[in-house]
């Protein structure tokens, strides 16, 4: 069975290393694969990041998750970013919706070593906001080194640093993505999974009026 992900395209995409290391590859899912995976995406009931535990999704999305966990992808990222990820656990979360407050400029926490996003939206993003910007600093979304629309099948990956600023202009509505993070330790993984689970529980409670 052929993989869903185009590993060769990811491997052939050069990384940029200033002011921090990142790459943007796409599309890494062809149209039939994108349609199949998007059709099996979890039915999320609100904004925020959700862990995979407790979510229901179809077989083709499950297959994508397994491909993200493969040593082949990890090896590509080790080469691109000159980092050893062999002892770094992988955290996978999903997002289905944006609120207008999302996308504020930030750097990822030091719990994360490498961050990746795989977008599962329509092949052509037409929203005014929601386009990820990789930034030179924390002061302005206009100070961008790259703008990455969340076209379906686009993958962006960067190595976390104190300079890896990013954000996007406000957008409210459906915006599907799989986030995958190599974490610095099992303890960091457990802490972040618990945080996301608690956050998702609170959001669900608010949605039904608890």
Image (tube, rainbow, N blue to C red):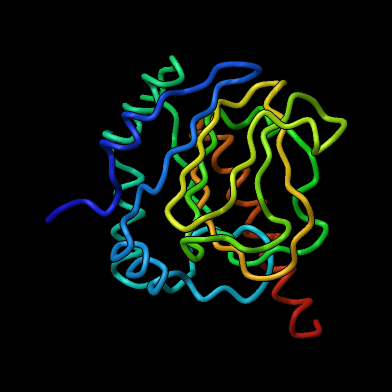
Question: In front here: 150 or 105?
Answer: 150
Question: In front here: 105 or 67?
Answer: 105
In the picture shown, does residue 81 fall above or below 192?
above
Kindly identify the residue that appears in the image at 70 percent across and 63 percent down: 98
Among the 4 quarters of the image, the one containing residue 207: bottom right
Among the 4 quarters of the image, the one containing residue 21: top right
Return the residue found at the far bottom.
208
Q: Is residue 146 left or right of residue 186?
A: right
In the picture shown, does residue 179 fall above or below 173?
above
Kindly identify the residue that appears in the image at 74 percent across and 67 percent down: 172
Kindly identify the residue that appears in the image at 36 percent across and 47 percent down: 28
Q: Is residue 59 left or right of residue 185?
A: left
Q: Quadrant of the N terminus?
A: bottom left
x then y, percent, for residue 116: 51, 40
Return the residue found at the far left.
1
x then y, percent, for residue 187: 56, 35
Question: In front here: 117 or 151?
Answer: 151
Kindly identify the residue that appears in the image at 79 percent across and 76 percent down: 206
x then y, percent, for residue 91: 49, 44
Q: Is residue 169 left or right of residue 120?
A: right
Q: Quadrant of the C terminus?
A: bottom right
x then y, percent, for residue 112: 59, 32
In the picture shown, does residue 180 fall above or below 171?
above
In the picture shown, does residue 149 fall above or below 96?
above
Total numbered circles: 0
Return the residue found at the far right.
139
């Amino acid at each position: 069975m052929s993989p869903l992900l185009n590993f060769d395209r990811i491997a052939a995409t050069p990384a940029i290393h200033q002011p921090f290391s990142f790459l943007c590859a796409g599309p890494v899912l062809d149209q039939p694969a994108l349609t199949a995976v998007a059709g099996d995406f979890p039915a999320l009931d609100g904004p925020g990041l959700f862990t995979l535990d407790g979510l229901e999704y179809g077989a083709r999305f499950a297959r994508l998750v397994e491909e993200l966990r493969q040593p082949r992808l990890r090896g590509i990222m080790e080469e691109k970013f000159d980092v050893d990820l062999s002892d770094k656990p992988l955290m996978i979360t999903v997002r289905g919706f944006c609120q207008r407050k999302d996308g504020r400029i930030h750097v990822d926490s030091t719990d994360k070593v490498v961050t990746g996003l795989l977008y599962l939206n329509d092949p052509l993003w037409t929203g005014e906001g929601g386009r990820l910007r990789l930034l030179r600093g924390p002061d302005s979304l206009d100070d961008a080194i790259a703008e990455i629309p969340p076209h379906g099948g686009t993958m962006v990956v960067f190595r976390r640093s104190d300079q890896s600023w990013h954000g996007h202009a406000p957008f409210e509505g459906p915006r599907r993505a799989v986030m995958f993070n190599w974490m610095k330790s099992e303890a960091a993984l457990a802490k972040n999974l618990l945080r996301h689970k608690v956050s998702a529980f609170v959001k669900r409670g608010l949605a039904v009026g608890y």
